[in-house]
């Protein structure tokens, strides 16, 4: 899908939609009415490959304890670990490839543990 916007303005638009639906950004990981995330934009790597690789290497535990990034990170550094992201993405863009790992959405989803995949409904 083509949005016709650069990543930063696209994220700002998503935040406007969230706000229009009642989302208030007060605390990280707090309950929210709506949560729209920008997972990837084509083959964009932001802010740079070195920063993204470092964030990907943190792993889920350390990443959760790290402060929220002050800038847009693309692709999302945890997308390859999350069935709830990959399963619906596989429905619309199964062949999209992560610009750093080269793995397709289908490959990343298949690589997840069966228990993680079982947590989301996956059309096979």
Image (cartoon, grey):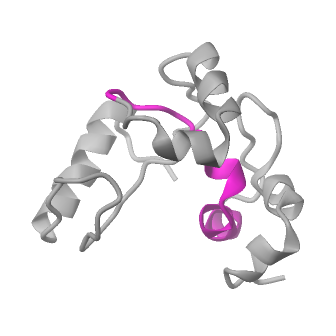
* Residue 122 seen in render: no
For image coordinates 51% across by 48% down, the residue present is 39
- Quadrant containing the C terminus is bottom right
Q: Residue 96 or 2: which is nearer the viewer?
A: 96
Q: Residue 56 or 74: which is nearer the viewer?
A: 56
Q: Is residue 7 magenta?
A: no
The image quadrant that residue 24 belongs to is bottom left
**Is 124 positioned to the left or the right of 49 in the image?**
right
| For residue 9, above or below residue 45 | below
For image coordinates 16% across by 71% down, the residue present is 21
Q: Which residues are magenta?
A: 70-92
| For residue 42, above or below residue 64 | above
**Is 82 positioned to the left or the right of 71 in the image?**
right
Residue 120 drawn at (x, y percent): 67, 80
Q: Residue 15 or 33: which is nearer the viewer?
A: 33
| For residue 101, above or below residue 83 | above
Residue 96 drawn at (x, y percent): 72, 47
The image quadrant that residue 43 belongs to is top right
* Residue 65 seen in render: yes
For image coordinates 32% across by 28% down, the residue present is 70
| For residue 91, above or below residue 124 | above
Q: Is residue 82 magenta?
A: yes
Residue 118 drawn at (x, y percent): 77, 82
Residue 103 drawn at (x, y percent): 83, 42
């Amino acid at each position: 899908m083509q949005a016709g916007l650069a990543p930063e303005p696209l994220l700002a638009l998503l935040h406007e939609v969230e706000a229009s639906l009642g989302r208030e950004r007060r605390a990280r990981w707090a309950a929210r009415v709506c949560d729209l995330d920008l997972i990837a934009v084509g083959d964009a790597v932001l802010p740079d490959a070195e920063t993204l690789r470092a964030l990907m290497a943190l792993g889920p535990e350390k990443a959760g304890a790290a402060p929220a990034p002050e800038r847009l990170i693309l692709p999302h550094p945890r997308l390859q670990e999350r069935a709830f992201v990959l399963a619906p993405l596989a429905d619309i863009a199964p062949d999209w490839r992560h610009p750093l790992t080269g793995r397709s959405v289908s490959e990343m989803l298949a690589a997840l543990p069966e228990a993680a995949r079982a947590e989301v409904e996956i059309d096979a």
